[in-house]
Amino acid sequence: MKRIGVFVDVQNIYYTTRDEFGRPFDYRAFWKALAQQGDIQVAKAYATDRGDDGQRKFQSALRHIGFDVQLKPYIQRADGSAKGDWDVGITIDILDAAPTLDQVVLLSGDGDFDLLINKIRGDHKVQVDVVGVPRLTADALVRSATRFLPIDGSMLL
């Protein structure tokens, strides 16, 4: 059975599906479809924590589905900008998990992950599927993946 790791850049998926479709991603349906392809051995969802009730309910729902939810505090800077980026954490976790997996599934449109994908494909011969909103996913990320799976209306609530 294929060993699968799934890693979700929650903020990226939230904002890209909201901006493109005005609807949220259906994590439960996604999990169900992915579980039919193999054994999900690692499943992490990376999010920022503002501490509001809506976020807590969403995080609880992700845990119920099977995700290990990783939280980082939301930081509002004095200039109004915000910080809550998980790129390094996602990268470290994927680098650690890749040698034990046959397939890595990354839900993100962030082009910064193209170097990571090229590395794990080259070093570990792992299949890497990138799931993202086509218009809002970096071309470099799409090119680096084994397969790009576009988010469309059928993958939304």
Image (spheres, grey):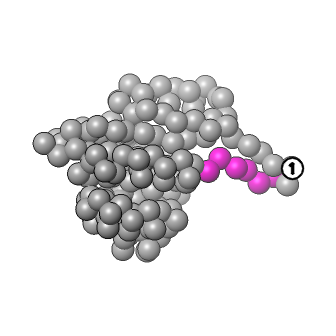
Give the main secondary structure, helix, strand or loop, of the magenta stretch.
Answer: loop
Question: Which residue does the image show at 66% across and 29% down from the upper left?
Answer: 51
Q: Secondary structure at mark 1?
A: loop
**Residue 10: percent from the left, percent from the top?**
50, 45
1 sits left or right of 16 in the view: left
Left or right, residue 29 beside residue 68: left
Q: Position of residue 45 (x, y in %)?
A: 46, 40
Residue pushed farthest left?
1
Mark 1 residue crowding within 10 angstroms, few (<14) / some (14–19) / many (20+): few
Quadrant for the N terminus in the image: top left
**Residue 55: x and y, percent?**
57, 32
Q: Does residue 136 show up? A: no
Q: Residue at x 42, y 28 (%)?
A: 63
Q: From the image, which quarter does the C terminus lie in? A: top left
Q: Is residue 155 above or below residue 19?
A: above
Residue assigned mark 1: 78
Q: Residue at the spot x=36%, y=57% of the render?
A: 131
Magenta part of the protein: which range? 80-85
